[in-house]
Amino acid sequence: MHVTNTDSDTKIAVTAITGFLGSGKTRYINQLLQQTDGANTVVIVNEIGQLGIDQASWSFVQPSVILLEGGCLCCQMQGSLSVTLQRLFTDALARKIPRFSQILVETSGLADPSALRFTLHTDFFLKERFVYNGCICIVDVVNAQKQAGFVEWSRQLVQADLVLLSHTDIASDEQTCRSVRHIAMVTDAPLMDIPAFLSAHAPDSRLRLMSVSPMPRKAGASMPFLSRHLEHGAQTSSSSTLTNTAEVPRQRPVISLAPVQMHSSIRIVTLEFAEPLRRSVFNRVLERMLERLGATLLRAKALLRFQGDEDAYLFNIVHAQRYPAQRLGKEAQAQQMAMVLFLDGVTDEMELPQSADFYEG
Ligand SMILES: Nc1nc2c(ncn2[C@@H]2O[C@H](COP(=O)(O)OP(=O)(O)OP(=O)(O)O)[C@@H](O)[C@H]2O)c(=O)[nH]1
């Protein structure tokens, strides 16, 4: 990572936050924004094969989140990223949205983050106005051994300027040591565990660590600030949205994605649910599904509602680890219910889960 003073003083800093499926990117950015003045920051979240599931967990923290969904940054979404960055710049210039000094791009768990750098360096408009500020790669030390076999894991790590270790609170010392040794074989980027990183740096110096020089914030500028995009129906492409669910949740369009997509060897299955589920049936079917999928399941995420309950819930599963469901606020009420599964090693004989399974149980 090398940023000249001139660049970092005058251009908007763009930082890639990468890491394999379920490594903890969303959680890390949430923590970072809670501890810093997120008002000068825009977050762009790239999701592959998902229906705004990450956006649901975002809307708690701050609404300056833009979702690029339906494909991967390194494959289908590069054009949408350019358009989104251009649009942000011109809207801030025209004072349609408050000024911001940095952008965090959360890549999908399968993306090659070099696509971001490439886009910023090759697009003339972007090159003049934005500066690549480096790449933070989050590595889950509990699952690093399993994930290191995937080319995506190494590609992300190779691009890292800083490696942050997640799940150290639940990892054994042995798991952490082995993961650190493995990481060191791929990159010589500095490495820290996330709690240590967050507590060791005051918010300002944390931003500077990635060579960001925060610009003074316009007095009175406050979030939420992206509603204009919605008012003008600003969609960057048919498969991406520029949206602010916290402010106008019901305007978010429902997008139907291909139910099965591939990314290298990984199969991405999206299940959509039209009606709230019965909790007991869901739990039973989920257990059965996890057992049946076994080691083929790399990651599952779901945003669901249940009969007799107004709230929506976010479910996170990483390999065999099922995290406690997270109750979401009212903002998530209008969001499409969906479950996304990332599978590896699926054979043709294997029956893929269907949304109907969760109603029949
Ligand atoms: N105990 C613990 N749980 C964590 C940690 N980091 C993430 N998690 C949990 O792991 C699950 C996945 O975390 P996310 O932040 O959604 O991961 P992600 O990298 O954004 O996931 P994808 O976008 O699907 O690749 C969530 O339930 C998190 O709360 C950590 O350091 N410790």
Image (spheres, rainbow, N blue to C red):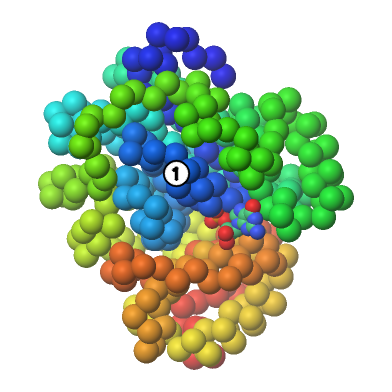
In the drawing, does residue 321 fall left or right of residue 47? right
Left or right: where 114 falls relative to 251: right
Residue 70 shows up from this direction: no
Residue occupying image coordinates x 26% and y 45% = 223
Q: Is residue 252 above or below residue 338?
A: above
Towards the viewer: 33 or 179: 33
Quarter of the picture for ligand 1?
bottom right
Within 10 Å of disc 1 (Cα), the crowding (few <14, some 14-19, many 20+) is some
Q: Identify the residue at image location x=45%, y=23%.
A: 212
Q: For the image shown, how many numbered marks are present on the structure?
A: 1
Percent across and percent down for residue 11 are 35, 18
Left or right, 158 with reference to 13: right
Q: Position of residue 276 (x, y in %)?
A: 38, 83
Dividing the picture into quarters, in which one does residue 309 lie?
bottom left
Name the residue carrying label 1: 33
Identify which amino acid the numbered label 1 is placed on.
Answer: Leu
> Which structural element holds mark 1?
helix
